[in-house]
Image (tube, grey):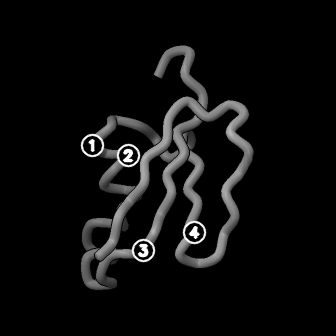
Amino acid sequence: MGIMDTVLIIKTGKTFSSLVSRRGDFEDWILAGMGLDKEKAAIIEVCSGSLLPTYDGISGIVISVFF
């Protein structure tokens, strides 16, 4: 990932439990698509009431949208 710091993934929902057990949740799909390890991400579940962190050290933001 070079000089980039942490990617912030803001989760607004979760996928179906049947998919999570087989393929992971939204953050797993996002990280795989970006070619990143979970250690390079801050995953915040705003759908569960988690607060957003300060943006110090954040190199990018991805928002998962669940309908």
Viewed as shown, does residue 14 lie left or right of 67?
A: right
* Residue 59 vs residue 16, the one in the foreground: 59
Residue at 31% over, 45% down: 32
Residue under pointer 2: 31
Disc 3 and disc 1: Cα gap in Å? 18 Å
Q: Are marks 3 and 4 in contact (CB under 8 Å)?
A: no
Disc 1 and disc 4: Cα gap in Å? 22 Å
Disc 3 and disc 4: Cα gap in Å? 8 Å
Q: Choose the circle earlier in sequence order: 3 or 4.
A: 3
Residue at 49% over, 42% down: 61
Kindly state the secondary structure of the residue where label 1 is placed. Answer: helix
How many other residues sit within 10 Å of disc 1, few (<14), some (14-19) or many (≥20)?
A: few
Viewed as shown, does residue 26 lie left or right of 60?
A: left
Q: Are marks 2 and 4 in contact (CB under 8 Å)?
A: no
Residue under pointer 1: 33
Disc 2 and disc 1: Cα gap in Å? 5 Å
